[in-house]
Image (cartoon, rainbow, N blue to C red):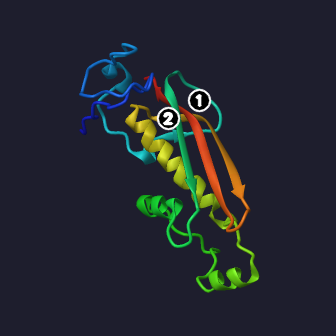
Amino acid sequence: MEDLAVPTTCPKCGFRLLAPAEACPKCGVVFARLAGPRHAVRPRDVVVTTGDLHCEYDVLGPVYCQVSNKGLFSNQLDQLADKYGIPRSSTEAAPGTLVFAIFLDEWPVGQQNFQRAFLVCVEELKRQTIKLGGDAIVWLRQDIDLDTSGFQFFYMQAYATAVRRRG
């Protein structure tokens, strides 16, 4: 069994700890109580829902992720997708369309990457939830902001509440 690391930031109030501690010096929350049982939770085991769960749970706090496809040859979305093993879309533009887009002064915003960005955000939220000692995510929401000035790109934000189910 894998032991969970002592947090460097209080999951309740966000206070940054300078050294490992059993409780937060600012709000007094005991980290062992938030961590729950000392068993390893894998990202694939974290339950994610856009609504509520039909069981009792303890709220651990909000989780948030933002990714962007900004960047011609390397971007945050591609880096995180590669890190988590999320494949590229089969409908992504071919490399030759880059030159074509520059000459026509039309740059696609990358809509084919929306699903990939969503999967990256969910994976990141799962990992943040595990760090807080949780095993489920409730009330997941996401938003996409488009920047269509010059080279077009998007930002996707996802946020939810990390929880630990009881029993």
Task: Residue 140 in the image: state x and y as whole percent.
Answer: 61, 38
Q: Nearer the viewer, residue 72 or 4?
A: 72
Q: Residue 136, labelled with which disc?
A: 2
Looking at the image, tell me whether mark 2 or mark 1 is earlier in sequence order.
1
Say if mark 2 contacts mark 1, CB within 8 Å.
yes
Decide: few, some or many residues near mark 1? Use Cα within 10 Å; few <14, some 14-19, many ≥20: some
**140 over 31 or under it: above or below:** below
Q: Residue at 30%, 18% (x, y): give it.
A: 23
Which residue is label 1 attached to? 53
| Callout 2 amino acid | Ala
Task: Residue 28 in the image: state x and y as whole percent.
Answer: 36, 13
Decide: few, some or many residues near mark 2? Use Cα within 10 Å; few <14, some 14-19, many ≥20: many
Q: Residue at 44%, 64% (x, y): give it.
A: 82
Q: Secondary structure at mark 2?
A: strand
Q: Nearer the viewer, mark 2 or mark 1?
A: 2
- Quadrant of the image occupied by residue 159: top right
> Position of 138 compared to 46: left or right?
right
**105 over 17 or under it: above or below:** below
The C terminus appears in which quarter of the rendering? Answer: top left
Q: Secondary structure at mark 1?
A: loop
The single residue placed furthest to the front in the displayed view is 150
Q: CA distance from mark 2 to mark 1?
A: 9 Å
> Position of 25 compared to 45: left or right?
left
| Callout 1 amino acid | Leu
The N terminus appears in which quarter of the rendering? Answer: top left
Q: Residue at 44%, 48% (x, y): give it.
A: 44
**7 over 84 or under it: above or below:** above
Q: Nearer the viewer, residue 52 or 129?
A: 129
